[in-house]
Amino acid sequence: DVKVTQSSRYLVKRTGEKVFLECVQDMDHENMFWYRQDPGLGLRLIYFSYDVKMKEKGDIPEGYSVSREKKERFSLILESASTNQTSMYLCASSWGTGGYEQYFGPGTRLTVT
Amino acid sequence: DQQVKQNSPSLSVQEGRISILNCDYTNSMFDYFLWYKKYPAEGPTFLISISSIKDKNEDGRFTVFLNKSAKHLSLHIVPSQPGDSAVYFCAARAGAGSYQLTFGKGTKLSVIP
C-alpha cells in the first residue's frame, strides 16, 4: 500500500510566522504535489515536483515556496503566514510521467490567527 | 477558467437507490479521467478511472461513463450505501506527458438511510 504521511494533522500559527509542512511518501514516487482545499473551491495546486530539487508552480503559488532535497520528502513553506492561508493542505504523490492516480496524505488543517 | 466542472455542489439519495454524479470538461486535451472520494478530515482516495479511448469502466458498485462528444462524464453508484456519503471529486489529465491533474470543485453526496 502506498503511504503518504504529513507531519501534522492540525496546526495553529500566528500571522507572520514561518510555517513548514512536511510530506513523506514511501513508494519511490517521482512526482509530489501540494494542494490546498477550501470549501466551494475544490483542490487547487500550489506547487509540484517531478524530481529531486525540481519544482514547478501550480495555480496558486503566491505566498508559498517548496523544497525537495530527497525523493521521498516534499516540504511546503509559508514564509510569512497570513489569515487567508488558513486551509486544509494536502500532499500527494504519483509515479512517472503518466500522471495517473495521485495518492494523498491525510491532510494538515492549518489555522492562522 | 474552470476546465473541470461539477455543477452540483450537493446530492441527496436514498439508501439502495442509484447515485449519479456528473462532471463536464472543456479541454479537448484531457485523455484520462479519475474520480476521488473524500471523507471529512481525510485525504482524497482514488475510486475509479477511465481512459478517453473507452466509454465505460466498471468496478463493483461504481461505474464511470464517458461521453467525449459532449465532454461529459458521470459516476454511477448502485446501490448507494450510507458509507458512500462523502465529497466526490472529478479529475482529468491533459495528455500522457502531463504530471498534473485538474480537479473539479466536488459534489457532496449524502446517502440517507
Image (spheres, coloured by chain):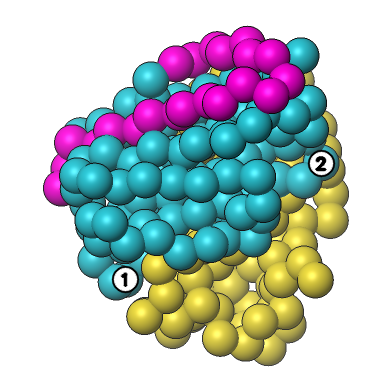
Q: Chain of mark 1?
A: A
Q: Which residues are magenta?
A: A8-28
The residue closer to the viewer here, A20 or A47, is A20
Q: Position of residue B96 (x, y in %)?
A: 37, 80
What's under tag 2, amino acid-wise? Gly
Q: Does B32 appear in magenta?
A: no
B71 lies above or below A99? below
Image point (44%, 46%), residue name: A66
Image point (61%, 54%), residue name: A61
Q: Position of residue A87 (x, y in %)?
A: 68, 29
The residue closer to the viewer here, B5 or A104, is A104
What tint does the image give chain A? cyan
Q: Is residue A27 visible?
A: yes
Q: Left or right of B23: which side holds B43? A: left
Question: Circle 1 — which element?
Answer: loop
The residue closer to the viewer here, A22 or B33, is A22
Which chain: yellow?
A: B
Image point (67%, 28%), residue name: A81
Q: Chain of mark 2?
A: A
Q: Which residue is mark 1?
A: A98
Q: Which residue is mark 2?
A: A40
Q: Position of residue B87 (x, y in %)?
A: 66, 35
Quarter occupied by the C terminus of chain B: top right
Q: Is residue B56 visible?
A: no
Q: Does A16 appear in magenta?
A: yes
What's under tag 1, amino acid-wise? Gly
Image point (66%, 38%), residue name: A37
